[in-house]
Each structure stands twice: as structure tokens, then as C-alpha cells.
Amino acid sequence: MQENTILSIKDLSISFGENEVIHTISYHLNKNEILGIVGESGSGKSVSSLAILGLLPKNISKITSGNIYYNNDDLTTLASKAFQKIRGKKIAMIFQEPMSSLNPSMTCGKQVQEILLQHTRLSKQETKEETVLLFEKVKLPDAKRVYNAYPHEISGGQKQRVMIAMAIACKPDILIADEPTTALDVTVQKEIIKLLKTLQVETKMSVIFITHDLSLISEIADRVLVMYKGDIVEQGDVSTIFKTPKHIYTKALINSRPSLDTRLKTLPTIDDYLNNTTSNEVITVEQRKHQHKKLYIKAPLLEVINVEKEYISKSGWFTKPQSFKAVNDVSFKLYEGETLGLVGESGCGKSTLGNAILQLDKATAGQILYKGTDITKLPNSEIKKLRKDIQIIFQDPYSSLNPRIPVGEAIMEPMMVHSLFNSDKERKEKVIDILNRVGLSEDYFNRYPHEFSGGQRQRIGIARTIALQPKLIVCDESVSALDISVQAQVLNLLNELKETFGFTYIFISHDLAVVKYMSDQLLVMNKGKIEELDDADVIYKTPKKEYTKKLIEAIPKGL
């Protein structure tokens, strides 16, 4: 190992059973360096990093060749006991999903204390003081309150900060951050990136930052390596990779993300690049104006008038109930064939507003007119009929599909509930047609949800929604958990279906680049109220409010 290198991976291969998933990869990590590893789900980036910590699942996986050197020690030869002294103390990890990584039955403070008690000689009182200091260091507001709080009592961004505090507690030499910002708002993501960079400069630790977003890598890493199907296809300093990418896959990753400057008719996908079938057809300003002229000449399909949603919290026997307005006096119009983008940080009220429109959570004040009828006053029997017309595509397709029902039956189920078509035979034919339309084949009809990838599951979710031939679809963060390229495929599919069936979308997301690409009008929400409502392109070019400017500035732009 060279003097400046702290970690060296040499010809590493990893297999799950007979299937080799990592093919003789080699790379190194220098002291006081941030190395970015980028690639889509299944590229091997997380599996190779779990191997460094000896965390590969014991019975189903094994390192078949190669070495992992940490300060000249080969980690592949270490016994479990020896690994315990390194894990957490010398090499620490921040996992992707803080909610499932934190113990829900322990306070946040106790979970960080546990690490300090195991790896240091500090007393219980000293570890408590050190934990509060760590919480202050990771910029947690009211560190003493968070110390005594359970994970469910703090926000997603705060949970991620607790995970970072836990990871840096023992001042490790190496920190592995595995997709630490994937499910976070752009503003929170920016704060976490800034925090990690600050901590790295302060502590001089080496960081491996894993993500599927190349733009994000450009904001934090010194060097980057690109992984594809278990191989490293390209590596070098960030500027070189961004400005002169050599491998076709790297070019595809850079270009699959919606541009903030030009509006392509269809987003390029990885397959488009690999098969040389990319289309650069742009939607011009004139075409957009012409389209909008046709849209806004008609009567609105949906009208939201002074809608409010108030929640009352009763925290104890002798305390006064507290009221909180999640949606506060919101009004807008939505036209047939339009896509209205709805953006804002977590807790701004965008999903609550979506649920009120869907009649899943009744508004406490105001009117919601659908085709001129106030749907807030409809009896339950009429709401059931309305369900056919107004549908939702959920954020997590896996948890919204029944794991015990084949996907074909899951798509047929709402058709049966609403008595669509005359027989199961007709319904099955329709489902097969819909599966084909969303890019899946007839063979998938009898398969179960666990047999599909994330992108395929999202297509099944979309198929289930369009099976009822609705008029209005609420897409609630429906692409936020997908890889860049799969996201491009799903966005193209949604636009294609909109043209074919004349759908109208309310597109809810915290990813502003995606919302701008999809939207005609854009509604920016903050603390339950509308901050701005205008043409999506106008808001991006000339945002009027400071809050909107802050959201736009937080988007990772690449180099």
C-alpha cells in the first residue's frame, strides 16, 4: 500500500451462491479524501462496501477472490471478534434508511451512548455529555431534547443527523456513507452534504460516499468511480468524469436526469445510450405556449377553494388541546390534460392536500369542486364512484401491493370492485394490454411483487392505477426512490400515458428538477400555505419568494 492510501481493494470478487455479483474490482481510498462511488441499484456499490465492514450475509454470500487492505491489514482474513474492534471505531457506516437503522424502542441519545460505552473507556456520565456534544456538532436543534427523544419523534433529516453522530462518535479513520440523502428534501440534502464536508475537513477522516446521483457526487467528492453490473467502468477526479466522461454508461447517468435549461420530449435512458437510440427532440417555448392555450380555454376539471386541514393534538389529561393547520387557505384550479407540480419541503402540507383532494382525509374547511360538484359534501356511496375517477400512484409500490397476490390479480381487483367489463376473461385481456402498455409482458401476470425490481414495481403500481381509466391521478413522490435511469423511464411512461389517455396529474415531489420537467403550472407550498403559483418555467427563471429561491439553489447542478 502507498503511504497516502488508507484502504485498498485488490481484485475483489463476491458471489451470492453461484452468481458472481462483483467481478475482480480494484480501487483505493486515500487519507483525508472523499471518494464517490456512483451507480444504479444492482451495480454492486453497496455490496462491495458491506464487504469492507465484514457485513455480507453469512450463509448466502462469500468473497471468492481478492483482498481488502486497511492500513496494511487484510480485512478478508479477520475473524468476527477482531472485526468488532474495527467496526464503528475505525471504520463506521451511515446507512441509507435511518428509520430502519435506528432502534425504535431506544431514545436517540442512548443509541449513540451505546457505541461510546462499547469502544471507549468513558464513564456513563461522560458518554452522555459526549453524546450531547456530538448532537450539537451535527447541528441538531435542541440537542438535549433529541437526546431524550425516540426516533419517531424527530424528522427524517434529524434522524439522519443522529446516524451521522453515531458514525463519527469514535472518530473513525474511514466513514462509509451509503445513500445518506436519498429520501430527503433538496434543502435537507444540501445541509447534510455541507455537514459531512465540514466534519471531514475538521476530523481529516476518509469518506466513501455512495449514491446513484452523479450531480450529488460533484458537490462532495474529490474522486469518483462509476460502477455498472459489478464492474468499475470508469474512475478519476470529479471534474474529468463530468466534463469528459469516456464510458457510455457514465454519459447516460449524467444525461438521464432532467435538465433545468432545456425540456426534452423524452428523457434519455441507459438503454437508449447503450443502443444508440437517444432522441434530442426539444419542446420549444412556442409549442408549450400553444399547448397551454388549448389547456386553459376549457372549464377547470378541479377547483380547490380556501381549503384548510387542521389537526388537533391532545397531549395529556391536563393540557389544552393544540391545533395545527397542515393546509391553510389553499386555492387553485386544475385543467383537464394539465400536470400541476406541487413542491415544498417535508411537512409543508403537499401530501395532506393530495389526501384531501382524494377524500382520504377530509378537509376541515373550504370547497373542492370536481367537474363543478363539491366532493367534500358527497355521501360515502358517491365517494366510492368518485374513486374510479380520482386515483393515486404511491411513493412506495412495494408496500402498496399485497405480497400474497400475483400482480395480474392485483391489477384486476379494482376493476372487479367498480364492475368494469363483463367477465374475468375480459378483465384479464385488459390487464395484459395494460401490462404491455407500461413496458411489462404477459409473462408477469402470475408473478408476485417480490419478484420485481423497484422500477418494475412502480410500473405495476401505475398499471393498477390506470386500470380504472381515471380522469385525475395524484402522483405522490412516485419516482423519488428510483434510480436516475429508471426514473427517466417512469417519467417518460407517465407523459406517454397522459397523451394517450388524456390524464390530468397532480405531481407531488421534493425533487424540483423532476417537477419542473413534468409540470405545466407549479405550486410551491411552505408551512401549509401557497408561496408561489405560476408557469413552471417562469418560477424557475424568476422565483419571486426567498423560500422558492432557497429550494432552487439547493438542487445539485453537477459541474
Image: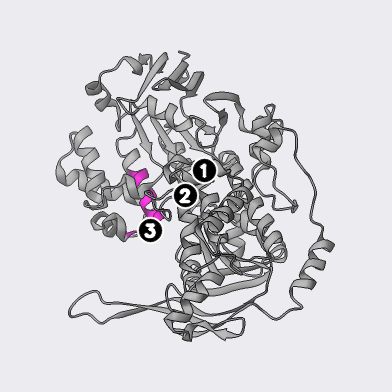
Q: Which residue is mark 3?
A: 155
Q: Which residues are magenta?
A: 154-165
Classify residue 286 as left or right of residue 321: right
- Main SS type for the magenta part? helix
Classify residue 161 as left or right of residue 501: left
Q: Secondary structure at mark 1?
A: helix
Q: Which residue is mark 1?
A: 444
Q: Is residue 70 in view? A: no
How far across and down, in percent of the image, does residue 198 sit? 46, 43
Q: Secondary structure at mark 2?
A: helix
Mark closer to the chain start, 2 or 3 = 3
Q: Amino acid at mark 2?
A: Val
Quarter of the view holding residue 17: top left
Q: Residues within 10 Å of mark 3 (few under 14, many from 20)?
A: few
How far across and down, in percent of the image, does residue 491 sit? 63, 52
Q: Which residue is mark 2?
A: 407
Mark closer to the chain start, 2 or 1 = 2
Q: Amino acid at mark 3?
A: Ser
Q: Secondary structure at mark 3?
A: loop
On the rendered image, what quadrant is the C terminus found in? top right
Where is 146 relative to 49, above or below? below
How far across and down, in percent of the image, does residue 317 sit? 17, 78
Q: CA distance from mark 2 to mark 3?
A: 34 Å
Q: Are marks 2 and 1 in contact (CB under 8 Å)?
A: yes
